Image (cartoon, helix red, strand yellow):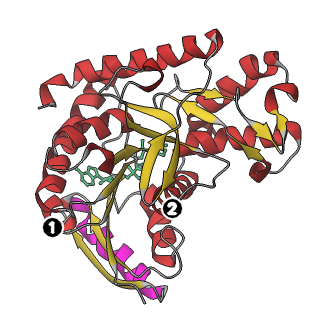
Amino acid sequence: MKAPVRVAVTGSAGQVSYSLLFHIASGNMLGKDQPIILQLLDITPSLGALEGVAMELGDCAFPLLKGVTWSDQAEQAFKDADYALLVGAKPRGPGMERKDLLDENAAIFQVQGKALNAVASRDVRVLVVGNPANTNALIAQRNAPDLAPHCFTAMTRLDHNRALAQLANRIDCDTSDIRKLIVWGNHSSTLYPDVSHALAGDRAIRDLVDQKWLVDEFIPAVQQRGAAIIKARGQSSAASAACSAIDHMRDWVLGTPADDWVSMSVLSDGSYGVTEGVFYSFPCRCSNGRYEIVQGLEIDDFSRDRMTATEQELLEERDVVSHLLP
Ligand code: NAX
């Protein structure tokens, strides 16, 4: 049996975590042979709720779950963490401007970046889920100068999975038949789901769906899916977000299939002309626990315009929080 690894989850008293923690503990994220110690973090008023979640985790009798701790102190929750899923964030309140949301969350991710820097494993793998996820990831990463930048990622896998589901439904195939889809950019309504390189089996998706449907229905549906879920459910996506976080981490740690890739928000190194130093969603391949941005894909004018628009939004977000970026 392998030695247990430590998985820290912030916002552990929230609705995404209420699904996520149970997937992690059951082995869906790191494999059925990987024992786990969960280290839960939330704010002080939620400590009672954290204890309740820990009790429920125990009640599941998961064979892989070797321990659960809970705390309202980031340095305690991140101590020796091998994996950290940063889900906790402040939701947009009534009357709050986007800038206020960015500011308030920036402060949280500044503290958590510093705490990760101080106490997490030097090889920690961090996934930021809490919104605005890409910019929060940038703040955490910049506040953790002793950790390699490639330790940090943000989640656009839910958008990727939403796009897969829309396409599979349209062309009447299984989601697993579709490969090489890309979500570019920010996890926001500017994201760009790109089918230019996508295949269903061995057929180009572009030959199976018309451009009008892509432009008028598919792209807006993926961009607006979060809002549609809120409208229907009265609450934001939770179980689907948890499943996507599991997919993201599993593929990062255990690897992507040789003939496919996934969408991950990672620190731009200038690939595809995207400004360096923002967390931008790229097509990535993973092996041996490391991601690499897929290189050499052709970008047409239609895609370029949309890739630039979502990049622009990230640059604007970065400007708003620039005072928190060392
Ligand atoms: P909830 O409001 O249910 O839970 C958030 C939890 O975070 C709460 O328990 C809160 O007390 C805690 N929290 C707040 N500040 C904290 C801090 N400083 N340290 C630790 N915990 C803190 O939200 P939930 O529905 O679980 O969503 C969590 C986050 O995920 C939100 O920011 C949400 O916008 C974001 N999402 C991101 C998605 C993505 O694809 N990247 C999709 C799902 C989700 O909407």
Q: Of the residues under marks 2 and 1, which one precedes in the sequence?
A: 1
Question: Which marked residue is nearer to the observer: mark 2 or mark 1?
Answer: 2
Q: Is residue 14 visible?
A: yes
Q: Which residues are magenta?
A: 45-59
Question: Is residue 18 shown left or right of residue 227?
Answer: left
Disc 2: which residue: 250
Residue 191 position in % (x across, y down): 53, 26
Camera sees residue 234: no
Q: Specify whether residue 54 is painted magenta.
A: yes
Q: Quadrant of the N terminus?
A: bottom left
Question: What percent of the width, then of the height, locates residue 297?
Answer: 60, 27
Q: Residue at x 68, y 49 (%)?
A: 259
Question: Is ligand 1 closer than 8 angstroms to the Cβ of mark 2?
Answer: no
Question: In the image, what residue occupies the spot 24% across and 72% down?
Answer: 70
Q: Is residue 57 magenta?
A: yes
Please say if 320 is above or below 121: above
Quarter of the picture containing the C terminus is: top left
Residue 222 screen position, x and y as percent: 64, 32
Disc 2, SS: helix
